[in-house]
Image (spheres, helix red, strand yellow):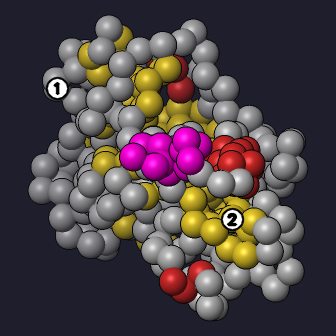
Amino acid sequence: MDFTIRHGLPFLLPNKAQKHVTLNEALQVLDLMTGLSVRSRSMPDQPAMPAEGDAYILPVDATDVAWATYPENSIVAFLDGAWSLLTTPDGCRAWIADETTLCILTSGTWTPLSPDVFPVLGVNTDADPSTRLAVKSVAVLFSHDDVTPGSGDMRHAINRETPGNTGSVLLQTDHYGGSELGLIGTDDFEIKLSPDGSAWTTGLRLAAADGRISLPAGFADPAGVLGSLGLQYPLGTIADDDTGTADFGDFVYGSAILAIPNSLTSGPVAFFFARMATTPALTTMFSTGAAFTVQTGELTGTTGEDGKINFSATDEGRLTVENRRGYGVAYTLYAFTR
């Protein structure tokens, strides 16, 4: 055997002439392979004026007279005025200068030792294929970039595939879900809550189509809370095809009006802004529950749309609730002003 096994360095044979030449050639290669550094692994054209000792990993599309004769991913070095092929077995490491990356040769392919993409990552805990990023810590900080520097912004994006999928934040206690907020199988933003991590109730919904707020689960003790904050007008039970009226007077204009049925399943919860223009009008801020309409002028019991609760404001500062649901509905109105 005249050469070493891994890097093909020549041995000094007993009867070989000019042994110093052989030794110098071996030392030259050994010098390159020790702490191997190449200028690039993506440069297809060999440089016109390389420096002595310059080395490159050849890409698939390497060209020109010398480089085109060598295989992809091989290392060539410019030694004594010519390009020479270095023997690089699997396990060799090379610093890629133009990428500032350390690579290792595996099955003929150079792979970064510190890749930018990690299949899984666990910080102080184990990650797995289903939970690819796992962090066990008392706090996690996501900060704006003041090093690169960045723009000063910081956004945390959660990207789902389709509106039928979920993009959410799940808050847990001992790994059982307690609340979830986000896009949960719909385009509407929702907040859901659960007492046991199994049965879930939607407490808040913001419609993607128009931004309206709804409270599917209703209010908790609204009379006790809201009655102390504004004018309260219980309308009592409004029979089908009948009306209930609250006379707020001039106080109503520029006020926020909250209409809550005593039974949250019988009619809509609606929140309006009352304004005086050419004719009085109500602007709907949010609603939830049964369907409703906003009318102008007087409501007499059968004026508005059948099957719905209809609301109206008149120029005397009177708010009217017309019930056309097909059964009696009890309402309480609240007015809040600045």
Instruction: Check disc 1 and give the amino acid type.
Output: Ala
Tag 1, which secondary structure? Answer: loop
Residue at (46, 49) in percent of width and height = 2
- The magenta span reads 1-15
Q: Looking at this view, name the residue that lies furthest to the left.
A: 326
Q: Residues within 10 Å of mark 1 (few under 14, many from 20)?
A: few
Q: In this picture, is 83 found above or below 30?
A: below
Q: Earlier in the sequence, mark 1 or mark 2?
A: 2
**Up/down of 255 relative to 60, above or below:** above
Q: Secondary structure at mark 2?
A: strand
Q: Which residue is mark 2?
A: 77
Query: Which residue in the protein does label 1 denote?
Result: 199
- Splitting the image into 4 quarters, where does residue 177 fall? top left
Is residue 108 visible to us here?
yes
Q: Residue 319 location in percent, x, y? A: 51, 54
Residue in the foreground of this view, choosing between 60 and 248:
60
Q: Position of residue 17 (x, y in %)?
A: 65, 54
Kindly report which numbered mark, 1 or 2, lies closer to the viewer in this rendering.
2
In terms of secondary structure, what is the magenta stretch mainly? loop
Q: CA distance from mark 1 to mark 2?
A: 67 Å
In the rendered structure, the answer to whether residue 196 lies left or right of residue 42 reads: left
Height in image: 298 above or below 25? Answer: below
Identify the amino acid type marked 2.
Answer: Ala
x 27%, y 72%: residue = 305
